[in-house]
Image: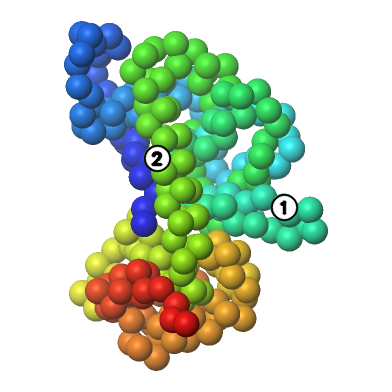
Amino acid sequence: MTDATPRAAGRGSAPGHRTSGRPSGHTVDVAELVSDADLLSGALRRDGHGQRYRRGQALFTEGDRAERVFLIESGWVLISSTSPEGREIVLGIRGSGEIIGEMSTVDGEARSATAVAIGDVDATVSSSATLTRALEDAAAARGLVLILAARLRDADRTRIQFATLDTLGRVAVRLLELSERFGHDTGNGIAVELPLSQEQLASWCGASRESTVKALGTLRSLHCITTGRQSLVIHDLVALRVHARRRPSG
C-alpha cells in the first residue's frame, strides 16, 4: 500500500522546457505523467515562497477558505477531519514532494480537512491563483489529474482492504505503507519514524486504540517489529505482508 502521489523534483532539478501538446493518439506512459507532476511542482516553486512549520502547527484548517496551496519539501503532515462527535479522523499522511490543499482550489469549496505538521515541515507556499494559472498548461493539468487519481485509487483500495481485514491486518497495512514511503534500511531492518500518537495510528487504521495496541504487541511478539519512542523497526517484511493480506477467521 503506498500513496502513489509522485515525488516532485528537488529545487535544483527543475524540468526543462517542454511543450504541452501531444499528437492525437499518443500513448502517455508513467514516466511522462510523473514528469507532468514535476512540471506542476516547478510552477508552484517559481511563484511560491518557503515556509517552515513547527510540530503541531496547522498549515490549514477544516472549514477555512482556500487561498494557498502547499508543496511539502521535507517533513510529515497529518491530514485529518473532525467527526460530528468531535473525534479526530486521520485521513492520511503526506510527505516530501507531495502537494496538499489543492482540492479546495479546484472546486472552490471550503477546506474539507485539517493539515498539521507532525514534526518540523518545510514547504513551498503558493497562492491558489498560481495553481489556477499553472493548470492552464495541459501537461501541468495532467500532473494534477495523476495526483488526484492516485489518491482516489488508494482510498478505494483501503476501503476494500479494511472491509475484510481485522485490526492486526489493518495495522500491518499501515506499517507497510510507512516503511515503503518513509523507511530506510539499517542493516537490522527497515527503520521508520512514527510521529503518530497511538490514538492517531488507531484512527488511521479505523480501529480502537486498545485493539491497535494489542495488534502492535502481537507483531512484536512475532518478532516482526520492534518499537521505540515515535519509531519502529520492521525486521520481517515478508511476515508483515502476510498479515496485511490475511482475512480474519470465523
Tell me where residue 202 sits by quadrant. bottom right
- Dividing the image into 4 quarters, which one contains the N terminus? bottom left
Residue shown at 44% from the left, 81% from the top: 249
Residue 96 in sight: no
List the residue tagged with mark 1: 82
Residue 10 visible at all? yes
What SS does tag 2 mark? helix
Which amino acid type corresponds to the residue marked 2 in the rendered image? Ala
Colour pattern of the rendering: rainbow
Tell me if 126 is positioned left or right of 238 in this view: right
Q: Is mark 1 on a helix, strand or loop?
A: strand
Q: Position of residue 214 (x, y in %)?
A: 53, 84
Q: In this view, does 84 lie to the left or right of 130?
A: right
C-alpha gap between disc 2 and disc 1: 24 Å
Up the image or down, 30 lies above or below 237; here it is above
Q: Residue 213 is drawn in which quadrant?
A: bottom right
Q: Give the residue type at disc 1.
A: Thr
Among all residues in the image, which is located at the extreme right?
A: 85
Foreground: 186 or 155? 155
Residue depicted at x 63% and y 74%: 208
Label 2 Cα crowd, 10 Å radius (few <14 / some 14-19 / many 20+): some
Dot 2 or dot 1: first in sequence order is 1
For mark 2, what is the residue? 150
